[in-house]
Amino acid sequence: MARLEVLISGAGIAGCTLAYWLARNRHAVTVIERSGSLRSSGSPVDVRGLAADVAERMNIAARLREASIRLKGMTLLDSEGRRVARVDIATLRSSIAPKDMEVARGDLARILHEASAGDADYVFGESITALAQDETGVDVTFERSRPRRFDVVIGADGLHSIVRRLAFGADSEFVRHAGLYAATVSLPGSRDAAGEMFMLNAPGKLAALHPCQGVPLAYFIFWRPEIPGFDDTDLDQHKRILETTFAGIGWRVPEFLDAVRGARDMYFDSVARVDVANWGRGRIALLGDASSCVSLFGDGSTLAIAGAHELAKALTESPADPQGAFSRYQAVHGKLVASKQKNLISTASRIVPRTSAGLWLSTRVFWRTMGGLGTVVRLGRKLRGQ
């Protein structure tokens, strides 16, 4: 089997998983990450279905289970902080999807990085400035390092992918604002929510408290058309937007906004869909959010892990034909992505209803149906003596 020299841009969930599988198949892997370290901010994420199977094969499932967030339930509140409805998440998950795990994003990135770091070369604080490919390889120019040539380059660098912009085209060609923005900020010193997630809805807005791993996270999600001049790196802009949007809502939201004002690091970004017709172009390909973002509600990490495994498999099967490998990878993984993208807006509308009527309907249909399902599962277990 030919040994490929592979450059991966992005040391996130997708990039670290791909590095593991390519190195395991004896390819030479270099991973660059423009940040100075692994990203630790962001909301908790899920490792479900195919991704849970991949984690088992990587021998990291036990570590992920140990790091898992033991979420007991989700409670919907009114503006005074009174319970309106509750879903027993622990019972439903253990019954319907016992292998699924919820993990802090930073913990998942760290575990994946540690699994691959012994066999792949990681370079932090580095980024690509130019790509030039021909039939046999790709010449890469970096911000700091000397230029190098690789057999294959993979852009696993997220929604705002540099590789996609350099090799495929401007963001405006592929990135579509889904109508929402999302943010999270940690609440150091806050009381732990004891395994419970609390959610408060107003028309078009959601504020929530997630217990995470002992340091609770405040969530903000809201519907808004694309904000003119929005900059995903401008922390001061993000703070102003959240203060304006969530002022006067009630419950513990003023406490959350205090944390926003004092934050030095906070996740804030638009919720977007990325639609790239062909994920591979010559010897350059896209992976994870760079190729097919379905941000929000945790599915992105599951898709990143499953997609990285599929791409590594395809490249290992035909290292002399990268374009053929990219086509097979997209043919398989694209089906999984399409189903998730199709449901993004409908799922968001159930979780964050846009109108008062939508809130009323969500409470009486979605929340109470899910709550009733948990009750049925518990009763069934009692009858079976479990």
Image (cartoon, rainbow, N blue to C red):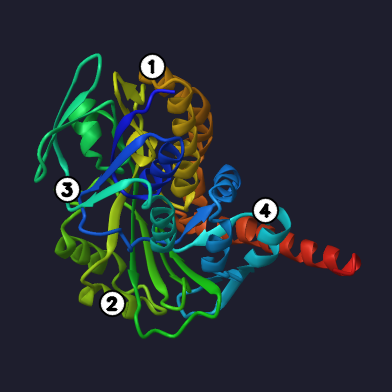
Q: Nearer the viewer, mark 3 or mark 2?
A: 3
Q: Residue at x 70, y 65 (%)?
A: 91
Quick one: label 4 or label 2, which is nearer the N terminus?
Answer: 4
Q: Which residue is mark 1?
A: 321
Answer yes or no: do the residues labelled 4 and 3 have beta carbons within 8 Å? no
> How far apart are labels 4 and 2 at the CA level?
34 Å
Q: Residue at x 78, y 62 (%)?
A: 377
Q: Which residue is mark 2?
A: 259
Q: Is residue 7 above or below residue 221?
A: above
> How far apart are labels 1 and 3 at the CA level?
28 Å
Q: Amino acid at mark 2?
A: Ala
Q: Which residue is mark 4?
A: 97
Q: Nearer the viewer, mark 4 or mark 3?
A: 3
* Quadrant in the rendering for residue 361: bottom right
Give the percent coordinates (x, y) of residue 233.
18, 55
Give the percent coordinates (x, y) of residue 254.
32, 79
Give the percent coordinates (x, y) of residue 127.
17, 44
Q: Which residue is mark 3?
A: 126
Quick one: label 1 or label 3, which is nearer the N terminus?
Answer: 3
Q: Amino acid at mark 1?
A: Asp
Q: Is residue 345 visible?
A: no
Mark 1 burial class by Cα count in 10 Å: few <14, some 14-19, many 20+: some
* Foreground pick, 295 / 306: 306
Quick one: label 4 or label 3, which is nearer the N terminus?
Answer: 4
Q: Amino acid at mark 4?
A: Ala
* Quadrant in the rendering for residue 108: bottom left
Secondary structure of the residue carrying tag 2 is helix
Quick one: label 4 or label 1, which is nearer the N terminus?
Answer: 4
